[in-house]
Amino acid sequence: MSAFMGEFSQKTSAMYYPWQHPQWQMLDRLLEIDRFPHALLLCGPAFIGKQHFASALAARLLCEKPLAGFACGRCKQCLLLAAKSHPDLLWVGPEEEGKAIRIDPIRELGQFVSKTALQGGRKVAVISPAESMNLNAANALLKNLEEPTAGTCVILVSHQLSRLPATVRSRCRLLTFAVPPLAEVESWLAQVRGRKGDVSELLGYADGRPLLALRLLESDLLENRRTFERLLDEVAAGELNPLVAAEKCLASPPGMAIDWLYSRVAAQVRTAGATGAMALRFRFLDKLVRVKSRLLGSANPNVSLLWEELLMDWQRLSR
């Protein structure tokens, strides 16, 4: 069993986030009429709670006596989940954050779904993030999606649906999640953090994504983001050499910093209108997607050189 599976295989939470109510209602109706899909694909931007939703759904599917559409929290299955020892729940993900899901954990998932549920109920397997599967892993998963085992549900969580093979996507019931309305995020942040007043800067940096906003509040990432934005301004103005700036970028998580740069360029696309630089911006956005894929792949690219190239492109684009 992979390190990820050992550490995270028992993630559970009985409740979904308030902005996920429509998706939960739809699945609850499918459960009532016994039409629940054997494979479910939760897709949408990162940091809006899809993995949390998968956790709540897994608890609901395994619970013996659900109450008002949620796991009861008191039956034997819920107690096993609370004790992080439920044998019929499996989480699969990369052994290290940002790395690929290889074929061995997917083979273990195949063995898991082929066996009878040890508790006599359903079995649930969650793959997150599903787009992290390399090609061999994705191909190995197909058999389980094509020949579903009775009483088993495979839940895939994807932040980048386009990176998931079409053969996998076509065999799952798609459930889409969007960034919730700004007012709803502000209300939720006020409830969980007691934060009132203007949060426009925070939500701007988080692209409106509630869990990223919360993460920024609870860590030093907000100041890191501000520092990164100042660095981009200085490079754009010619006040900071891209090669020097690239070394400074190494202090931030590379995947997240790429997202920050993507957000900056995407904002320019939204506000600039039809200009001669628009095509260049779109090409740069495509390049950022490719760079992030390289960072998530099995190779180990030179991150410093990647940043040097990206920031030189950014400086040229800004001129």
Image (cartoon, helix red, strand yellow):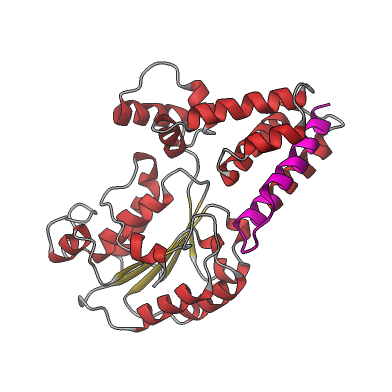
Task: Identify which residue, 57 or 304, lies in the foreground.
Answer: 304
Q: Is residue 207 left or right of residue 18?
A: right
Residue 293 in the magenta stretch? The answer is yes
Residue 153: image location, x then y, percent: 37, 70
* Depicted 20 relative to depicted 71: above or below: above
**Count of marks overlaid on the render:** 0
Image point (56%, 69%), residue name: 168
Going by the picture, which residue comes out furthest to the right? 276
Quadrant location of residue 74? bottom left
Image point (13%, 62%), residue name: 75
Task: Identify which residue, 249 or 151, lies in the foreground.
Answer: 249
Q: Which residues are magenta?
A: 291-319
Quadrant location of residue 197? top left
Q: Is residue 244 left or right of residue 275?
A: left
Residue 253 in the magenta stretch? The answer is no
Question: Where the N terminus falls, by quadrant?
Answer: bottom left
Image point (49%, 39%), residue name: 179
